[in-house]
Image: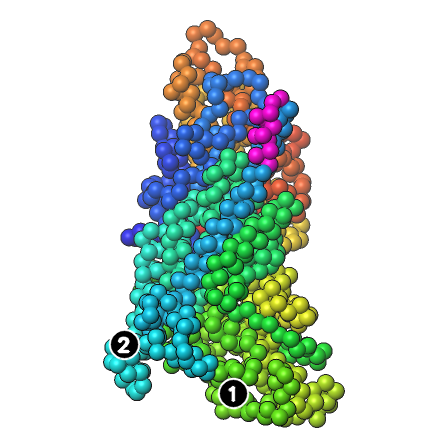
Amino acid sequence: MGHWRRMASHRRWGHREPLGLEALAMDQKGYRRGSFQSSTSDEDMLEIAGASVDLSMADDDPPLDREMGGFSTYNGGGMNGKSTMMDFLEEPLPGVGTYEDFNTIDWVREKSRDRDRHREITNRSKESTWALLHSVSDAFSGWLLMLFIGLLAGSLAGLIDISAHWMTDLKEGVCLAGFWFNHEHCCWKSNTTFTDRDKCPEWKSWSQLILGYGEGAFAYILNYFMYVVWALMFSLLAVLLVKGFAPYACGSGIPEIKTILSGFIIRGYLGKWTLVIKTITLVLAVSSGLSLGKEGPLVHVACCCGNILCHLFTKYRKNEAKRREVLSAAAAAGVSVAFGAPIGGVLFSLEEVSYYFPLKTLWRSFFAALVAAFTLRSINPFGNSRLVLFYVEFHMPWHLLELVPFILLGIFGGLWGAFFIRSNIAWCRRRKTTRLGKYPVLEVFVVTAITAILAFPNEYTRMSTSELISELFNDCGILDSSKLCEYVNDFNSTKGDDLPDRAAGPGVYTAMWQLALALIMKVFITIFTFGMKVPSGLFIPSMAVGAIAGRLLGVAVEQLAFYHHDWAIFSGWCSQGADCITPGLYAMVGAAACLGGVTRMTVSLVVIMFELTGGLEYIVPLMAAAMTSKWVADAVGREGIYDAHIRLNGYPFLEAKEEFSHKTRAMDVMRPRKNDPPLTVITQDSMTVEDVETIVTNTTYSGYPVVVSRASQRLVGFVLRRDLIISIENARKKQDGIVSTSIICFTDYCPPLPPSSPSVLKLRSILDLSPFTVTDETPMEIVVDIFRKLGLRQCLVTHNGKLLGIITKKDVLKHIAQMANQDPESILFN
């Protein structure tokens, strides 16, 4: 990818590619032959997720709906019923019924094909034992696939966790007992006391290793220098790998996965190269100390696993709608291993990423998430029998009056979420529209350098963000040596393990201002980090911002209660010497509030948080904070971060949550409009091969209505451009007598021709005889609902049975944007 530029968009009316680049032609994958020349050149580029991708380069995975020896087909079955007439080939045509890159799948057709396939297997199962066994294996294949996805996703997550933990510690020093041990594992076998457990002789900082001593100004400067050098090495290696091998591996991946699950095809986005590079670069990016997390990219990694494993099973390899059910389950497995929250993962897939989520997918998602969590637990990456680094347990109950600070944290989370989304989208738009986007390596270098230089002096920004969250969530005990737990101890009042609220010592006050500085840094540096050309998740930085704010507020309330326990608001429940305020709980509630403000998750967020903490009694504070943050953030701006990035990139995503309330009709949106050229149509039995080839060559539309005649305009059906091209090419090669003057016939019985006429080309089998139609007076709110709920690519508009025009998904999206006073040209790839 030596040069990074955008694709010139084609501005033509009509029934263009319903979902994608109108001019993306057959020149990919060997479909550029004969007279069919696309208006898109090999050099055209496309910008996805901020990475410009050269469409002419080979995919990193073979087309997902193709087999090595042939293609899955839709040969007139499904909606049209089985065609009894054999056309020019006895075998189904390879490639018919498949989709080009940057197109939308036809959900109705895909589901229909799957029903036909299932009906055929069921009927055959009554004929022989072998067919019965095939039927059983077909039914079981879905569960087997979920097992494989869970095992692979859990294993990769364990590998990423262990590697990232080791490489993060490598920035500060190395273990002499074995360089592959991280700091914690290195000191496990040491004989040091509990308070000095981090200063074991086996672990050497870089100054101790190079200079022989670890104290003093020069040692500090050397450690500082090595920290920055390692951070720059890791981040540069990550961005170079992404740029060189898999441009799709950058970013979080969740906006693209939402778009893919809605039916869009982005070849290679879930391919094997993307999986390999994303796994490696995710470890490097997290280890570099950048303000990003691995949780979002783990969803992308799990979906890559799901997509690649789909090739093992015919029913998922050949059906794009079935494959998307698998990807929904894989997304659940990704969140399951990211947070150790299987139920939260299922709810995240349902609430946040999935477009079509039937009950069967819910059960399979649950199973995949269970297997993934079990696999990660078996690997035990953190050595504490927990699935995440920041697992905590609280035992103290909370008081009703504490809902006030919890709601304040919710307001802070909502305001920060709205501020972050606006700032990050503005920066990403600047990156796309200025020269900044041409220098991704330089951008990563500068942001990493600034982050590392600012992070090292402050111990709370120097540690990994997961460790920071763990420290902030922690409830102080007697043996805690953290500065956050340096209270003035009065052990006479200690009852068992529960420590009373105590006066803050000097360590706590030092920690407070260090955390305040860390909060300011995290708030601003995350804006510039998310969206760079390295894998970057948003869950952990958002939680860190909220956890810092929550801990600061928690300590403030705790000290207020300690010094003013006689106040009316504390007198009833917080007497002197009692343990009533848990600052770690405030950190947890703040983390949930900020994550909710950025992503607008609610149910799945609360479940993920209580699975993280094991505290069922804290569901109400979490719900209060999550709901408040959503309300506040929605009041400032309606979109969550993923929806905002979908809109920024121009992806064809029809949001199911938004209501369409405008009083427009189908005739206001359909093409052609007044003063436009007439609609391009094909007649059922009067056009020659040459006529159809001319139409295909001169237009970039993805399909054509078939009518009885140009005069009558009575609708017969709809035929896809790709199917037409493949069928004509095959007929020219394999059927004798097919020439440019041959008549193309889409009916059962073709009109009689003179004996000297060339052979007729019968193409009824590729014709969709039941395209969706609406009348010109249909309200647009109904049309939008049809597109959303049936996943249509296009809908034909008629008046008294005559064809008037066509509405594509692109037209619907542009109309919605126009009604919302947005730029309609921003839809579908800027």
* Residue found 65% across the figure and 29% down from its top: 801
Residue labelled with disc 1: 486
Residue labelled with disc 2: 209
- Is the magenta region chiefly helix, strand or loop? helix
Question: Is residue 257 among the parts visible in the rendering?
Answer: yes
Q: Label 1 amino acid?
A: Glu
Q: Residues within 10 Å of mark 1 (few under 14, many from 20)?
A: many
- List x then y, in percent, for residue 215: 31, 86
Figure label count? 2
Q: Is residue 352 above or below residue 728?
A: below
138 drawn magenta: yes
Task: Determine whether, in the image, residue 55 is placed left or right of residue 663.
Answer: left
The magenta stretch spans which residues? 127-139
47 drawn magenta: no
Q: Residues within 10 Å of mark 2 (few under 14, many from 20)?
A: some
Q: Label 2 amino acid?
A: Leu
Q: Give the SS element for disc 1.
A: loop
Q: Give the SS element for disc 2.
A: helix
Q: Is residue 825 above or below residue 196?
A: above
Res. 710 image quadrant: top right
- List x then y, in percent, for residue 803: 60, 31
* Residue found 40% across the figure and 64% down from its top: 164
* Residue found 65% across the figure and 75% down from its top: 395
Q: Residue furthest top?
A: 755
Q: Is residue 221 above or below residue 23?
A: below
Q: Earlier in the sequence, mark 1 or mark 2?
A: 2
Q: Residue furthest left?
A: 211
In the foreground, 109 or 323: 323
* Residue found 54% across the figure and 22% down from its top: 764
- List x then y, in percent, for residue 648: 48, 57
- Numbered circle sitting on residue 391: none
